[in-house]
Image (cartoon, rainbow, N blue to C red):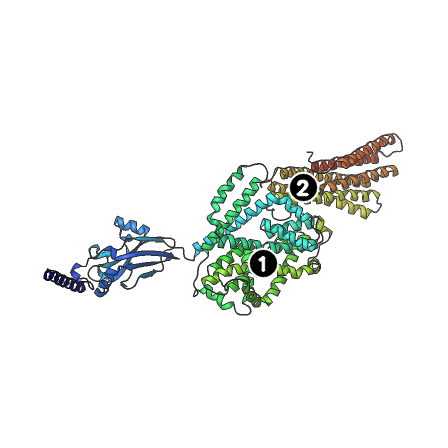
Amino acid sequence: MTKGINFLIALQLLLSTALFANQGSTSNSIEPASFEYTSDMIQNVHVKSGEESAKVTWSISHEAYEHLKEQGTQLIISYNTKIGKKRAKAGYEAGKWMFTEPIPIDQNSYQFENLDGYETYYFKVGLAKEGDVANVKEDKSKMVWSSETKTKTKRGWGIAKLLILIGALGFFIYGMKVMSEGLQQAAGNKLRAMLGSITSNRVKGVLTGFGITSIVQSSSVTTVMTVSFVNAGLMTLRQSAGVMMGANIGTTITGWLILLLGFKVSISSYAFMIIALASPLLFIQKGKSRAWASAIFGFCILFIGLDALKHAVPGLDADSTIVQFFTDFKDVWYGPVMFVLLGALVTVVIQSSSAAMALTLAMVSAGTIPFEVACAMILGENIGTTITAEIASMIANVHAKRSARIHSMFNLIGVTWMLLMFPVFLKGLSYFVEGDPFSTTEEGIAVAGTTIVLFHTVFNALNVLLLIWFVPQLVSLAERTVKSKGESDEEFKLDFIDGPLGTTAELCILEAKKEVAKFGKTTSRMNSFVKTYVNSSDKKEKYKMLGKLEKYEEITDRVEIEIADYLGKTAQLEMSSEASIQMRSMLNITTDLERIGDIFYQIGKVLEKKDGEKSYFTPEQREGINKMLTITDEAFEIMNDNLSAQYGSISMEKAVEKEREINALRDQLRRKHLKNIEKEEFNMNSALIYSNVFASFEKVGDHIINVSEAVAGEI
């Protein structure tokens, strides 16, 4: 029994030893005769696209690698375009697959350059079963190929990419415009009420400017509204300075929105969902629903454009010419000044400091420009936006020019003191953020965007804190550098709408309303010209008054046409029913004021004819005309007060009472006149002229009451 067991154990040990020896002789090598070439040997083939380039990566199976290396096998990549592949399949010579040079077996990636941009390419990696791969690459029987993989290359920097960049920037600007207009339509009256409530407190003005700009996301809109109030006499130039300072801080909110919602969190990914939720508002006619829909649509379009802008900005490596240019000049003493001018130029060209800010942040995130250069360009963008305002004010009145000049001086002074301490300030600011914004690593680029927006906000806030104490000096300097041309500069041109059409119907109506109010005051001056003529015995003075009557009649004709043309363009904009009623009222008012100008001109011609015929008014006739002039002047005062008031909210009591007084005086003068012409010594020629004159004043009174009725909404 024991012998049998020992025999079995010995047999088992013998078999185990033989098996182990056999395994040892076959585990470390593959016999050439048993090696099989298959496509599974080439694994994990991937391709990553770049700008007119692509990178193909792969791996060789562990089991086959040693054998292929021992055999000296080389790899090769075959590639083709989408169109070329179809042509090759159809047998066309032009569609032949292309090949790389042989690649060593221990290499696992290959970089393709100079491919066509925005083109679909197919790739496959292969090796030869036998022979040199360069000679047998087109012989399918002697090659082993991996499965095909494809990618679409990105556009390289050129005309097409430049147009895409400009288009993305335009989409961003359009979105901001639509959003700003929608917010103005939705909250326009409240914004104007905020401006109208400003006192002489300059701090309150700064807070108001900041609040309005933060709401409408446009410092230009705030500036336009502010200038309008200055021109209307509702706000002094000193008060407007505070508002524009606040607008400078308010415009930095846009940078934070771009950074947080465009770069940190991609709102563009949710834009279409937000638009879908806001779409029903477009079909609600009541209230401000459509205005809010426009604001939401503009908000989404803005961030869709920003997303396109980020992808359109070229990503350049550290050795590229552009990056080297910025890097070389950022440390020289005049470098910041040069980049400030560059930022100003960019802003002037695209006419939007917010869009310039978005472009700057996109270039920083792509690694195109360093942190210091971006901050200098931000300073330049602050100057660029003032240049835009200066250009726009060239055709405006003296008040608009002075307001633009204050804005320019404020920003220029701020940029000057910042440049003097630029490196120290940036270094100090970097201590308040996590990371190093000066670094060119991915972490540094990520924190640079936040630091740039922080720099923009801190700079504008410090500039306001510094210069708010010098507002009187800024105003005085603006008044000295922008001289008024005198009365002609103030009277004989449109002060409020002599420029580009406003951004919304409500703002256009506001500007036109102020112009109509000024039109009323201009027309009422003709009454004083007639009064001077009637009571003067100086021929030169009479001649001067006739010239003024003729000049003012031309002015009333021109102003009526220009206001009507402006309102006609405004009518093409989307507006509320309230704005539509006000527009119709203003059209009626300008017609009545123009007719008043015609009547006064005819009165002047009649009086000129009287003097030419050597006819004279009696003391009683002169007294009657003076009474009519006085009561007409009082009617004009009531009319002008009504024109400056809120449309639809005036009381007609005073205007109606004065109209009755004019009619009663006309009737009284007529009765006396009819009695006087019965006298034999009465001059019939002067009697007819006298009758014509006081009857004409009654017609003036009719048009004056028509104006007040239009303001009250009784049309």
Rounded to the nearest angstrom, the CA distance separating label 1 from label 2 is 45 Å
Q: In the rendered view, does 159 fall on the left or right side of 486?
A: left
Q: Nearer the viewer, residue 649 or 518?
A: 649
- How far across and down, in percent of the image, does residue 432 sit? 55, 63
**Residue at x-position 63% and y-position 50%:** 224
Q: Nearer the viewer, residue 530 or 139?
A: 139
Say which amino acid is labelled 2.
Answer: Glu
Q: In the rendered view, does 676 fall on the left or right side of 329?
A: right
- Residue named by callout 2: 560
Question: Looking at the image, can residue 435 be seen?
Answer: yes
- Quarter of the rendering occupied by the N terminus: bottom left
- How far across and down, in percent of the image, does residue 34 sit? 17, 59
Position of 658 relative to 355 (above/below): above
Mark 1 vs mark 2, foreground winner is 1
Say which amino acid is labelled 1.
Answer: Thr
Q: Are marks 1 and 2 in contact (CB under 8 Å)?
A: no
- Residue named by callout 1: 457
Q: Please, what secondary structure does the residue beneath circle 2 have?
A: helix
First in sequence, mark 1 or 2: give its number. 1
Q: Nearer the viewer, residue 560 or 187?
A: 187
Question: Looking at the image, can residue 395 be seen?
Answer: no
